[in-house]
Structure formats: structure tokens, C-alpha cells
Amino acid sequence: MSTGKFIVIEGMEGAGKSSAITAIENLLTQQGIEFVNTREPGGTPLAESLRDMVKSVDHQEKLTVETELLLMYASRSQLLANKILPALAKGLWVIGDRHDLSSRAYQGGGRGFDEKIMNTISDITLKGFKPDLTLYLDIDPHIGLSRAKARGDLDRIELEQMEFFIRVHQKYRELAAQDPSIVSVDASQTMAQVHQDIIEEVQQFMSTIEQA
């Protein structure tokens, strides 16, 4: 398994992405697989600056939804070219905290951007690149947001109305059902069970690679 692979953890606020990533890190370490981590938006110095623009609640002017969308893909383009692709070329695995599916759910579902627009921008920036495996942590937005609020201050997107997150959740589920490379995990279970499900899915993915 020397060929690099890109595994992405997706999900709404409060779904438990950080602890899920730790579970995957532990598994890859046990298997002797070298890996790097990324997050979106962000992951490189310039992309992190773009992340700050997207997340900040302190802008002196209103950030338009069009600007938000383009900043997301600008950040993703930087991350892909300067971190993800070079790591994969070296045979490293990459564990991503969010990727294109997030934009499809938040900007496509939540903001209502047309799929053709999303496809065009994605084609320009990603050029058909996709994760090898996406693990979508599915949780009711009411539960997820209550967890996120318990963690502390919310960022600009997390302060959206519940109707926004309901649309995001619906789009996540819709897209996950259409793509066999996206595996849904019930994130409302106990953390131990969620992690067990994730580990089993990654192990199954590894077995598929070995058999190929």
C-alpha cells in the first residue's frame, strides 16, 4: 500500500470530526502508514488566511455569498496544489478535515447555488480530483449545533439560522446517497461506536486496495 490515498472526514458542526480523525490517525499509525493532515478551508499559509476571511465575524462589511463560495474554492485550490497532491505523489496518505463535499452542502445546499455553477468552479480548481474515500458523519443539525455551542464561540457560518443547517443536512444526505465513495456513519451513536464504525470502514477500504 505504498500509493498515497486521500481520506476525507465530512460532517456538520458537532458531528465529531476531530475525534474521528484521531481514530483514523491511530489506525494508520498501527498499520505503519505515513500520513499528513489537512483542513478546509485552510491547510497552507495562504489558505489559512482565506479561512480567516471566511470564518471571521469581525468584518467591517458583509461578506457576500458569492465571495464566500469563491474564497472556499480559492483556498481548496491552494491546498490541493501545494499540499495534497505533493503528499500523494510521495506515497503519503492524506487525512482531510472537509473537502469539496462541504462546499456542495454548505454553499450548494445551504446558500442555494446552482449545481452547474458549482460544477464549473470545481472543474476549474480541482480538475476532476476526488478523495479516495469520504466518511460522512451524519447528525441531526439540532443536535450538532447544540454540541458546537457547548464548545464555545461560534464562527460566522456557525451563526447561521437553523433553516440554513437543515438545508445543508439535506444536501449532505442527498449527495452521500448518490456517490459510492461516500460512506455515511451515524454520528448520533456513542463516540466509541462511531469510532468503531469508522475504523471498520477504513479497514474495509484497505482490504479493497490490497485485493486490487
Image: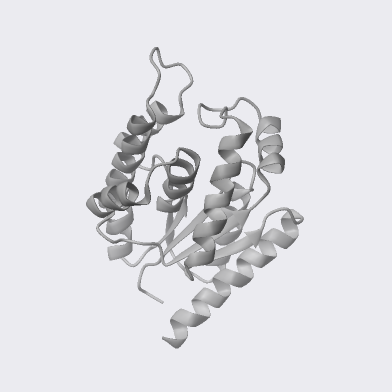
- Quarter assignment of residue 186: bottom right
Q: How is the image coloured?
A: one colour
Q: Residue lying farthest right?
A: 190
Query: Which residue is depicted at the point 65% across and 35% down?
Result: 148
Q: Is residue 8 left or right of residue 152?
A: left
Query: Which residue is depicted at the point 30% across and 35% down?
Result: 46
**At which x and y percent is residue 63?**
39, 23
- Quarter assignment of residue 89: bottom left
* Vertical order, 54 against 80 (above or below): above
User: In which quadrant is the N terminus drawn?
Assistant: bottom left
Judging depth in this view, the residue of 104 and 125 nearest the camera is 104
- Quarter assignment of residue 111: top left
Query: Which residue is depicted at the point 27% across and 57% down?
Result: 86
Q: Is residue 52 left or right of residue 32?
A: left
Q: Residue lying farthest top?
A: 60
User: In which quadrant is the C terminus drawn?
Assistant: bottom left
Q: Is residue 121 left or right of residue 165?
A: left
Q: Residue lying farthest bottom?
A: 211
**At which x and y percent is residue 118?**
34, 48
Q: Is residue 45 left or right of residue 161?
A: left
Query: Which residue is depicted at the point 59% across and 27% down?
Result: 154
**At which x and y percent is residue 108?**
43, 45
Judging depth in this view, the residue of 67 and 38 nearest the camera is 67
Is residue 182 in view?
no
Count the marks: how many?
0
